[in-house]
Amino acid sequence: MLATRFLFFQTLPSNFPMSFRLIVGLGNPGSEYDKTRHNIGFRVVDAFASQRGATEWSKNRNLKGDLAQFEASDGTKILLLKPRTFMNESGVSIQKVCSYYKIPPESFVVVYDEINLAVGEVKVSASGGPGGHNGLSDIIARIKPTFTRLRIGIGHKTPKEMSLADYVLGNFNKEDETLISASMERYLDCLERLVREGAEKAMNHINRKPKNKDREDGQL
């Protein structure tokens, strides 16, 4: 069934315009992790799937992830993935999906939590190290560091004495949860730009420093 439903990734013509064919949200499976900081990648990709009218999520044991798909405005088919391998082995599922569908590292984007950005902030990067993120570290080790990152700010660890694991596996406080909800439209717009424009052009828009008038609603 899966080979039939997603065969389009293997049959795109060689001269097809470059576009992301895979969007991955990072997180941990299980309802107990739903609202944790570490699961913001899952939340953003879930919201994006809903916004774009993607197919229902389906579990694939062989590829170790939940999969959905939608068609971009130019006809490109986009595959969405939520690995079910737990955060520290995120690369296992991504590697399997990329191998099965012949997707190169340059053709997927990973959405994940970033402690070096304030809550509500978002940035795009096309290279770099894991920055202490275990999920990203596993992806880089198993694949290549040449994929695009959509980094969702979760704020610096506080208090400083708290372990990083406890911080990222904790829930957002009420104030931060409100800001995350208010910023969701911005996150989805960033993904839309990446799909529609590609990394370089989208990055120039997303990473620009906002003017004061852009911040009237408290968002970037």
Image: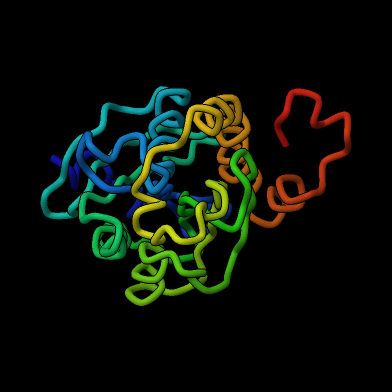
Quadrant position of residue 89: bottom left
How are the colours assigned in the image?
A: rainbow
Q: In the image, 131: left or right of 212?
A: left
Residue depicted at x 53% and y 52%: 16
Quadrant position of residue 49: top left
Say which of 45 and 163 sits in front: 163
Residue depicted at x 48% and y 72%: 145
Q: In the image, 218: left or right of 94?
A: right
Residue depicted at x 56% and y 40%: 191
Q: Quadrant of the C terminus?
A: top right
Instruction: Give the x, y percent position of residue 169.
Output: 34, 49
Instruction: Give the x, y percent position of residue 31.
Output: 22, 34
Instruction: Give the x, y percent position of residue 188.
Output: 55, 33
Residue depicted at x 54% and y 25%: 178
Instruction: Give the x, y percent position of residue 113.
Output: 48, 50
Q: In the image, 45: left or right of 119?
A: left
Q: Is residue 167 above or below residue 133?
A: above
Q: Is residue 5 above or below residue 166?
A: above
Q: Quadrant of the N terminus?
A: top left
Q: Is residue 101 above or below residue 67?
A: below
Q: Is residue 80 above or below residue 140?
A: above
